[in-house]
Amino acid sequence: MKKYVVYLTDGALNDVEEIVRYITDNDGSVNAAHVLDEFEKTFDSLASFPDRGAVPEELLALGMREYREVFFKPYRVIYRVFDDKVYIYLVVDGRRDLQALLQRRLLGA
């Protein structure tokens, strides 16, 4: 089985840090540690199966099919595969308005 190297962009790393900080402040460090563990499992799974994600509907509507997403409810992880590398661009609460975030982060990149 081919292994991919997974990279978090600065934006995705900031997303994870903000989410963990918010959960720590509002739900406690135990819950924050659980969410961080789940993120790490999600990222690790992309090293083995990066093509399992679906194209985000918001990007499909724009004709962009090169990005994919996986879920750790309610969070969405948006990424792109290049050769043997996976680049994670966005980690966001799926309840947020993603259209503006995706356009700013992915189309502005």
Image (tube, helix red, strand yellow):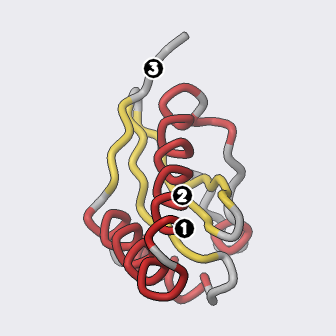
Report the residue at 50% width, 88% height from top: 26
Q: Image quadrant of residue 18?
A: bottom left
* Disc number lying in front (3 or 1): 1
Against 103, residue 67 (above or below) is above
Which residue has dot 1 on it?
A: 31
**If the image is split into quadrants, where does the C terminus sit?**
bottom left
Three-letter code, disc 3: Lys
Q: Which mark is residue 63?
A: none
Residue bearing mark 2: 34
Q: Say whether residue 76 is left or right of residue 88.
A: right
Q: What residue is shown at x 68% (from left), y 63% (from top)?
A: 56
User: How far across and down, in percent of the image, does residue 98 sit?
Assistant: 60, 82
Q: Which residue is mark 3?
A: 3
Dot 2 surroundings within 10 Å: few (below 14), some, or many (20 or more)?
few
Classify 98 as above or below 75: below
Q: CA distance from mark 3 to mark 2?
A: 25 Å
Spatial CA distance of label 1 from label 2 is 5 Å
